[in-house]
Image: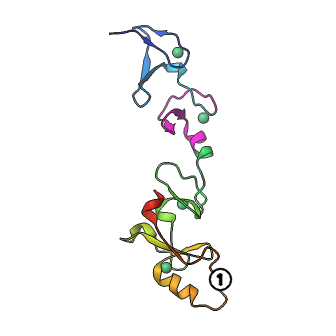
Amino acid sequence: MADKSCAGCKEHISREQEHLAVNELGQFYHHECLTCSGCRDILRGPFSLWENSEPLCDRCLDERSPRCAECQYPVSDVKLRTKFGYFHPDCFVCTTCKFPFINDQERNYFNVDGRPYCHRDALDEISHPGVQGSGGFQETAVRDAF
Ligand SMILES: [Zn+2]
Ligand SMILES: [Zn+2]
Ligand SMILES: [Zn+2]
Ligand SMILES: [Zn+2]
């Protein structure tokens, strides 16, 4: 089997040296050479891969992750990208009744005045005089946001 070299320091990894295999990257590292690409701390525990290529510690992952427009916590793994911003799937809810669109079979929401509504509440909303849907009254499939 071919000799391995460390993707961190580019040095040879000898048989005796402990090393890590990062399968997702197809690369090997000395224990002390796998560092967070954000803060450069050595990664000793579980870490995440940003954009499938950069190892990141949890802290840096949180910093880089967009904030959920609803709960303000970082959105990392599963996120919805909508014209209203990023959301945790459970946090993308109707402005009026708080129904999570993810639970709707059709996963459709309606944009009224730049806010998301379920069908019923959207109809209710546009029936009020004076409401001008700036983005129009528009049906959007949430599944397209994935
Ligand atoms: Zn190394
Ligand atoms: Zn870090
Ligand atoms: Zn959230
Ligand atoms: Zn609703």
Taking the spot 59% from the left edge, 77% from the top edge, the residue there is 136
Q: Quadrant of residue 35?
A: top right
Q: Is mark 1 within 8 Å of ligand 4?
A: no
- At mark 1, the secondary structure is loop
86 or 70, nearer to the observer: 86
The amino acid at mark 1 is Gln
In the rendered view, tell whether residue 126 sits above or below residue 40. below
Would you call the spot at circle 1 few (<14 residues within 10 Å), some (14-19), or many (20 or more)?
Answer: few
Taking the spot 47% from the left edge, 35% from the top edge, the residue there is 46
Q: Quadrant of residue 126?
A: bottom right
7 or 140, nearer to the observer: 140
Q: Position of residue 23 (x, y in %)?
A: 39, 28
Q: Position of residue 117 (x, y in %)?
A: 52, 76
Question: Magenta span has 30?
Answer: no
Per the image, the residue denoted by label 1 is 132
Horizontal placement of 130 versus 54: left or right? right
Q: Position of residue 82 (x, y in %)?
A: 54, 61
Taking the spot 49% from the left edge, 16% from the top edge, the residue there is 6
86 or 38, nearer to the observer: 86
Q: Quadrant of the C terminus?
A: bottom left
Question: Magenta span has 60?
Answer: yes
Q: Which residues are magenta?
A: 39-61
